[in-house]
Amino acid sequence: MPNRINKLLFQEYTKFFGKAAAVFSIGYEGTTAVDVDKFRGKIEAGKYNVLFVKNRIANAAFKELGIENVISICKGGQAALLSTDEDPVALARFLVESAKEMSTLKLRGAVVEGTILDGKAVDSLSKGMSKNELKGKIVGQAMSPGANVAGAILGAGARIAGQLKSRIEDLEKSA
């Protein structure tokens, strides 16, 4: 019986971790059931996915997906949070804020695009720019020279148009 259950869990974990852009590991030892319930509510409100996992099977699932040495972040009572929106920074920010609110939550680490991060690296990741912020910054920088050129052209054109209008008004007054 346990063998069949473990196989089903393994399949579920492999599917869960396989569709993720990033998987974050948090420890929840010492957290009350009420706090865990509140935390789950926040997770659902943030549209993230959570799975309370068995470490041995989670490590095997990561190994199946080609990610080795995850054992450093898969230990003790843990929950795995999944980011599917290609933006792990938003989930990292959410977890850092949640860990500040509930001192019993511990950021163990993450697997982001196949790279294993420890808790300190997750904290650093949360302070970075999200993909949408980076895209906006890059687009703004790419458009800046064009906007300057357009402004220079339009500025000169507007000045000439203003002078022509003024000259026309002067000629109309004198006529």
Image (cartoon, rainbow, N blue to C red):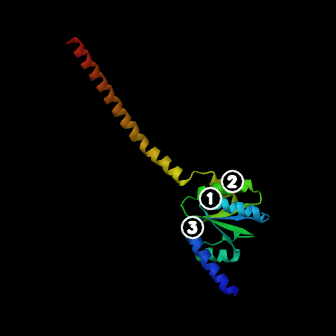
The amino acid on which the numbered mark 3 sits, given as a three-letter code, is: Ala
Which of the two discs, 1 and 3, sits closer to the camera?
Answer: 1
Q: Which mark is residue 20?
A: 3
The amino acid on which the numbered mark 1 sits, given as a three-letter code, is: Ala
Disc 3 crowd, CA 10 A, few/some/many (<14, 14-19, 20+): some
Seen in the image, is 66 located left or right of residue 27?
left
Question: Is residue 78 in sight in this rendering?
Answer: yes
In this view of the protein, which residue sits in the foreground, 27 or 111? Answer: 27
Rounded to the nearest whole Å, what is the CA distance between mark 3 and mark 2?
Answer: 21 Å
Rounded to the nearest whole Å, what is the CA distance between mark 1 and mark 3?
Answer: 18 Å
Q: Are the two marked residues, 1 and 3, in contact with CB atoms closer than 8 angstroms? A: no
Q: Are the two marked residues, 3 and 2, in contact with CB atoms closer than 8 angstroms? A: no
SS state under label 3: loop
- Label 2: which residue? 97
Q: Are the two marked residues, 1 and 2, in contact with CB atoms closer than 8 angstroms? A: no
- Residue at image location 66% in from the left, 67% down from the top: 80
SS state under label 2: helix
Instruction: State which tag comes first along the sequence, 3 or 2.
Output: 3
The amino acid on which the numbered mark 2 sits, given as a three-letter code, is: Glu
Instruction: State which tag comes first along the sequence, 1 or 2.
Output: 1
Q: Quadrant of the C terminus?
A: top left
Disc 2 crowd, CA 10 A, few/some/many (<14, 14-19, 20+): few
Question: Is residue 116 in sight in this rendering?
Answer: no
**Which corner quadrant of the image does residue 95 belong to?**
bottom right
- Label 1: which residue? 45
Locate residue 53, reporting x and y percent. 68, 72
Q: Quadrant of the N terminus?
A: bottom right
Question: Taking 69 as reference, is 92 above or below it?
Answer: above
Locate residue 164, reporting x and y percent. 26, 23
Locate residue 135, reporting x and y percent. 49, 51
Quick one: which residue is furthest to the left in this view?
A: 175
